[in-house]
Amino acid sequence: MSKMKIATVWLDGCSGCHMSMFDMDEKLIDILEKVDLVYSPLVDAKEFPEGVDVTVIEGGVGSEEDKHMLELIRARTHMLVSYGDCAVTGNVPSLRNRFSVDDLIKRSYIENVSAHGDGGGNVPGDAVPRLLPVERPLHEVVRVDVFIPGCPPRPGLTYFMLKELLEGRMPDLKEKTRFGL
Amino acid sequence: MNESARIVTFKMDGREIGAREDETILQVATDNGIFIPTLCYLEGLSAMGGCRLCMVEVKETSKLVPSCVTYAREGMEVITNSERLAKYRIMLLELFFAERNHICAICVANGRCELQNLTVNLGMTHVHFPYFYPRVPVDASHERFVLDHNRCILCTRCVRVCAEIEGAHTLDVMTRGMDSRIITDLNQAWGSSVTCTRCGKCVNVCPTGALSEKGKAVADIAVKKQFLPYLTRMRRGKQ
């Protein structure tokens, strides 16, 4: 039987969820022996492949690039996992939602920048994806199959979730995790 | 409690139960080891039926009734847990999250929050409703306490403890519906309140991180609610 194709994706988050995955320590070997990691910040694949069995997504949808990526992932993934509070609730990145994007950009790149001698920063242009009006959790943009709250989800829980999915079961995460922890 | 209250018998989750007629369904359930979730109810304060999480099914009516303000009646049949109730309770929790900015990861109550705990106990995985993201302030003008409207669920425990136990009635509620806000005195900064006695009872009864004490690390914060039933009993002249 061919190995299960797994991808992990980092959208608008702090990468803490990926760090938490590493904290599985030697159990990572157990998982990696059974899967092909086809796309991840940890592997050198430039384009998201077709026919992925499970994609674990950290971070919310904050920019046009995030939205485009998420829609592409959904179209090419069988089981989509919303992983961590940013993906599930918007979490810390959603703190910006009370302000307009223009105010936010001005505050970040002009008013709060002291490194420039003239007292004003430069607003990035073409190289940076445009922010969406609000940061959104994944399930407000695409269909999500599994929700794993936590900031970040604990390593043991991640192992449990992957193990269940690998064995063809839908992980029952009730009473195992919560927002913020 | 009324000394001459009659005893009534009724069914709760199929069990025959006897209770005083001046006891609420919630009190009877708690006494009999049946868990009904609540957020606004707290023993020692008046019940207000505001959060609606304690709603139960009563056979004679198709409406759900809040068990904290519904009294036991002879022959009634109560169901405290059903698929229908579970669905509505989760929906209510989701609405609490959607209405304000509860970002658990950066909350002073993270790990000891009653709202957060209920998401685990009732099995809420995510919020189906679009988040509202209201732009609400944080009042840190008081020398000892902070009022963060982002975390407030309007349970009014703070309002009731301040009025009913402390007797100051510094806190109250302003406007209606989703615009409702906890205010101090005549909607002035808490730090300028002349009625606040700085007793901290409000902070101790807050179920979320809306009210907190300044100058303490999150891990050192412990809320004390035991004083409420004690104070209530003492005021009635009973130990």
Image (spheres, grey):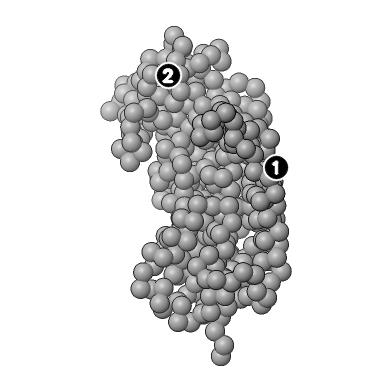
Residue shown at 40% from the left, 77% from the top: A29
Q: Where is residue B26 in the image (x, y as percent from the top left)?
A: 49, 42
**Element at label 2:** loop
Q: Residues within 10 Å of mark 2 (few under 14, many from 20)?
A: some
Mark 1 residue type: Pro
The secondary structure type at the circle numbered 1 is: strand
Q: Can residue B181 be seen in this view?
A: yes
Q: In the rendered structure, the residue with mark 2 lies on which chain?
A: B
Q: What label sits on residue B135 in the rendered view?
A: none
Residue matched to label 2:
B142
| Disc 2 residue type (three-letter) | His
Q: Mark 1 points at which residue?
A: A133
In front of the other: B50 or A63: A63
**Is B1 located above or below residue B111 in the figure?**
above
Q: Camera-side residue: B78 or B46?
A: B46
| Residue in the image at 53% along x and 75% along y | A37
Percent position of residue A163, x then y? 47, 75
* Letter of the chain that mark 1 sits on in the rendering: A
The answer to which quarter of the image holds residue A168 is bottom right
Instruction: Give the alpha-carbon distance from disc 1 to disc 2, as whole Å.
Output: 34 Å
Q: Nearer the viewer, residue A64 or B116?
A: A64
| Residue drawn at point x = 49 percent, y = 72 percent | A162
Q: Share a chain, discs 1 and 2?
A: no
Q: Nearer the viewer, residue A11 or B134?
A: A11
- Residue A92 higher or lower than A79, as above or below: above
